[in-house]
Amino acid sequence: MKLFPIRGGIHPEYRKDLTSEKAIVAMPMPAALYIPLQQHIGAPAEVLVAEGDLVKKGQMIARSQGAVSVPQHAPTSGRIMSVAEVAAPHPSGLPQKTIILEPDGKDEWGDLPEPIADPFAADPHAIHERVAQSGIVGMGGAAFPSAVKLNLGTQKKLEILLLNGAECEPYLTCDDRVMREYPGEVIDGARIMARALGTPRVVIGIEQNKPQAIEIMTRAASAFPEVEVVAVPVQYPMGSERHLVQAITGRETPARKLTADLGIVVHNVATARAVHHAVRFGRPLVARVVTVSGGAIRQPNNVLTPIGTKVADLVEFCGGFSARPESVVNGGPMMGQPLASLDAPVVKGTSGILALTAEEINDSPTSACIRCGSCVTVCPCGLSPVDMAAFIRKDNLDVAAKLGVMDCFSCGSCSYVCPSHIPLVHYFNYAKGVLRELESDRRKGERIKTLAETRTIRIEKAAEAKRAALAAKSKPAADAASSGNAGEAKATTEEKVNA
Amino acid sequence: MKKSGPFAHGFTSVQKTMFLVLLALTPATVFNLYLFGWPAILLFIVTVGACVAVEAACLSVAGKPVMATLADCSAILTGWLLAMSLPPWAPWWIGVLAAIFAIALTKHAFGGLGQNLFNPAMVGRTVMLISFPVAMTVWVAPHPLFSAGAPGLVEAFAITFGGSIPDTMSAASALGHIKTELSRGIPVTQSIGQMPDLMDMALGYRAGSMGETSALLILAGGLFLMAKRIISWHIPASMLGSLFLIAALFHAIDPTHFTSGTFHLLSGATFLGAFFIATDYVTSPVSKSGQIIFGIGVGLFTWSIRNFAGYPEGVAFAVLLMNSLTPIIDQYTRPRAFGRTRKGEPLPLEGKP
Ligand code: SF4
Ligand code: SF4
């Protein structure tokens, strides 16, 4: 298949060999599981259980709230200890509402929904329904509710389901292992998703640094003419949705549009496998494969981890730390988030837990920008990080916005190459945060202004009516006009590598 | 703990970059120091030392960390390039004054490393050339170290610190010679016959500043930097290409007034300029398309100045001219953002950029 070049990008040290040959192992059930109500983009789930309740594995313990939300299920059988505030797997380490479950050791499944007998004859809505019920989110890290993304076919004519097996982040090998060990499940899940989306084609994109996965998946796909495996070049951030779409189809997703507007929907390979489980066995998403790696981990591994396992327990299972980690990261080293505490749980979007040494991170004090232009050359979004950073430093966020800082998806390529070790991504995240806030303030302000204006008009109209009434002395005062205000819907597209 | 990603970094640093540039300059420098002997070595030491001293002084006045910043080697590089663009037997105070102009007035007055608009070494050289046209145009023929007639260390002190160059030793640089002869009505076709042949020019056996001689060693250093990805081909290729093409064109039209493209490439500071001066990160555009425009500009200005202005060598002026345009070039050559038109509007859905 002819591929298309993508702009910029980098070739970091991949260090995937730490875990790429380690077969997936299931970890024993920890003493307690911590299941946050929000593990996804969108509204948090609503608790269905109370302290002391006995639950079975797979039982829904929190239901989705609103259109963009997912339910949570018990990862094993046991007793609800409490619903409490626990540190979230987020750099802030701020607590969030979490269900704490004490496993009973039996790991007994509860009543699961019936398998969908023939998904390829089933109504696409039945598949959406099932995926939504099963609490599945994008497992590449974005954690966007998968059912919402599977619904796109009802609004748009779609051509391709692009399965993202690029896994372009260094260290991570969980998708690689899933493809090598469960190729049939991944492809079946993908075909089911294609059915739900109404796409006639499935393309599976895998970076060339995973030759076994490419071979195994190609063999498994050979039975299905609509499924095609494509080896894509090793180039970070190939796993970014928009860039993978461009590499494979040559089409560039316009700013503020979705790849779906081009007729292409991207899902992660692990998500496809979760869909397979949900549709074929009625099993919700209660565990995932996590790559535990980094120079400070004694036994790096790919671990099948129950959702809600404390990072500390997972690290313990991998032999603990062999050295003091400089940072512990949730996700890959390029786009992952630092963990403030090892008490944070593994969630549905956790693709990796990396304990990195100072040498691996290779950080240095920041020095002056020498205008080398490397950041401009590598930016896969065609931005000029050096200029944006200069304006952000002067607190001139308007110009930074004009230069496109909101288009930056924090891939980290610019920070990676900067010889002066300028924390460019940090600047951009800051600017994006402030600009988003300003934007929502502005909308609020506009709403208030509209309300105020409506009120003035109403008063004026009333006054006029009164005058008219006085003048005519016979006509009754007209009713003042009233007006509503339609809230503006804000479309945000959250994007993440390996979404 | 590191607060924000990425949790990985390439093996680049400012210090490493500067160090590789110095390394790339070393062969040509050593060869030229050998060629021009002790006076050149003394001037080199004085100039580099002055740059480092001025840098340290400026940093401490500005209250910035002195040792940590000196370690980035940028002052050494400036001094080094400055020394290579001065007449090798120039008196010591030329080196010191040039260092003050380069480091204090061009770099630190604008805020230090990365903030200057103009290339410090070229400002240093150019100010000297304008202020002291005589001292800055005394060239000597090569006097290799330890060869017969070469000044010993003691004589060298007299030359560098006493300011006396024996008249018999001075010579004209190739570009200067052609220009002088042309002004006396002697056509290029004739005066070029009295020049060292092009091969000698390429190897460096001729009069000139250190950076002007030995184009081949400079070229080798430049290619090394490209291989190490410190510089890219964009500026050198566009500068050399445009210089060659315009020179060749006019040479074809009127060979009595215009020297050939090859002559322009091999003479003066062309190669030093193309690989080490015009490629200075700070003072050249950051985008690749901007770098090509910049390179073409330097090439064309170099040729024009060499032919039509009062000075035989134009690289320094050309670089400075283009330096002043860099902010504008940068502004108009930003890459097109992903999913957007050049104007910054989202791409139309079905259209191609
Ligand atoms: S990579 Fe760093 S030093 Fe180079 S231009 Fe960008 S911000 Fe400046
Ligand atoms: S982090 Fe943003 S600005 Fe930097 S390279 Fe990635 S997309 Fe470009």
Image: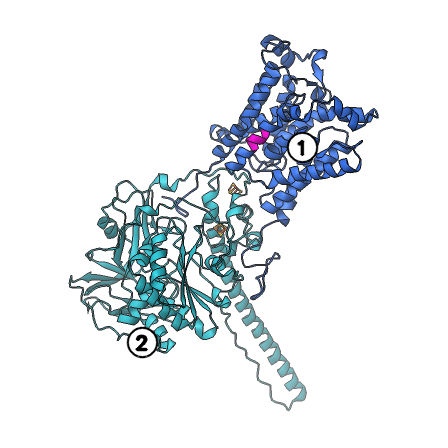
Chain colours: A cyan, B blue
Q: Is residue B66 visible?
A: yes
* Other-residue count near label 2 (Cα within 10 Å), few / some / many at <14 / 14–19 / ≥20: few
| Residue at 36% across, 38% down | A359
Where is residue B240 shown, x and y percent of the image?
65, 37
Q: Amino acid at mark 1?
A: Leu
Residues at discs 1 and 2 in contact (Cβ within 8 Å): no
Front position in the image: A438 or B129: B129
Where B146 sits versus A262, above or below?
Answer: above
In this rendering, position of residue A285 left or right of residue B329: left
What is the CA distance from the residue labelled 1 to the residue labelled 2? 74 Å
Range of the magenta residues? B218-222
| Residue at 29% across, 66% down | A72
- Which type of secondary structure does the marked residue at label 2 adopt? loop
Where B324 sits versus A114, above or below?
Answer: above
Q: Which mark is residue A118?
A: 2
Q: Residue B105 is drawn in which quadrant? A: top right
* Other-residue count near label 1 (Cα within 10 Å), few / some / many at <14 / 14–19 / ≥20: many
Q: Main secondary structure of the magenta part?
A: helix
Where is residue B90 shown, x and y percent of the image?
66, 18
| Residue at 36% across, 64% down | A222
Instruction: Output the chain of dot 1.
Output: B
Q: Which mark is residue A410?
A: none
Q: Badge 1 is on which residue?
A: B265
Where is residue A299 shown, x and y percent of the image?
25, 46
